[in-house]
Amino acid sequence: MNEMTEGAMNVANETARQMQNFFHVNEIINYVKEPEHVVKFATGVIAVLIFWVVYRLIRMIIKKGAARKFEPRAVKTITKVVGYVFYVLIVMYVLGLFGINLGAIWGAMGIAGVAIGFAAQTTVSNLISGVFIMTEKAMKIGDFIEVDGVSGTVDKVGLLSIRIHTVDNQLIRIPSSAIINTKLKNYSTFDYRRYTFDVSVDYSTDLDKAVEVLNGVPARCKLAVTDKADYAPKVLVTGCMDSGIGMTLIVWCERQNFFDLKTEVCVQTVKAFNEAGINIPYNRVDVSVLTDKTIPSLSFKA
């Protein structure tokens, strides 16, 4: 029984010794015993607390200021970056406080940064472009955009890419750098959109009458805006073409009615011209049927 008790005590003592070695308890005790180390430790704790309070104040000021200029997603990104910078500075301060050489750490971080930059050039480019997109506020979730011939509704705006779904319900991921480097069209920025409808009439048509009839088409369209001076419809005679005289009808509508307006304008224009007896020219092909009597005979001499 005594041997078992003695064995258990040995195991407990060995476990305690290993735990002390693992957590460096003896080193910490010896370090704390020296007065200058205690002062340095207390100074470090106080400095960290002061830095924390200053960080919270700066974070609050930046958050309020950015909220007035940027979207919530951009504000969240900015506050995260500020937080990461604060944590890096605190770690560096604490390491320097305990006499650790920071020059080697900064050198290692610089070499690692260069290596990571070369290995992830595309990712870094997209990351920087994503920050510009968020701060520029060129789009938001729900907007209908077009980038490099691809159009759709924005579902997500991230740092590395944005996600849209097309009109035929396909998911497309567009890298942020592609948006910065190419032309971006946002069809949802403004409340009204303009539709330009081209049509032609015969050369024998009375142009004054044709202009009058075409001017009356917007009034026949329920979706066309006709009561706002800045978005008033307009008719232009664009010139002489091969088969007729070109005319253009410019009509405005609310953004969500754009596609329906295109059909409405075409239908009402054709109806109005038919009612007024105005002919819309189109290409014709004359076909002659040849019979045996009309086909000339050919003879060959040897």
Image (cartoon, rainbow, N blue to C red):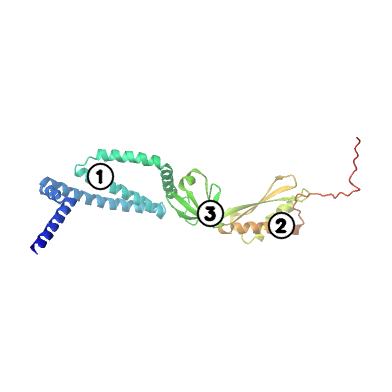
* Residue 213 coordinates in the image, percent (x, y): 71, 56
The image shows residue 142 at horizontal and vertical percentages of 49, 57
Is residue 124 something one can see in this rendering?
yes
Find the residue positioned furthest to the left. 2
Which residue lies under the disc numbered 3? 152
**For the residue marked with disc 3, what is the amino acid?**
Gly
Q: Residue furthest top?
A: 302
Q: Identify which amino acid the numbered label 1 is placed on.
A: Met
Mark 2 or 1, which is nearer the eye? 1
Q: Earlier in the sequence, mark 2 or mark 3?
A: 3
Q: Do the residues labelled 2 and 3 touch (CB within 8 Å)?
A: no
Q: Name the residue under label 2.
A: 270
Element at label 1: helix
User: Mark 1 — residue?
Assistant: 92
**SS at mark 3 in the image:** strand
- Labels 2 & 1 near each other (Cβ < 8 A): no
Q: Say whether residue 178 is left or right of residue 286.
A: left
- Where is residue 210? Give x, y as percent: 73, 53
**Res 191 → quadrant:** bottom right
Name above or below for residue 56 compared with residue 302. Answer: below
Is disc 2 placed on a helix, strand or loop? helix
Q: Which of 13 and 66 is in front in this view?
A: 13
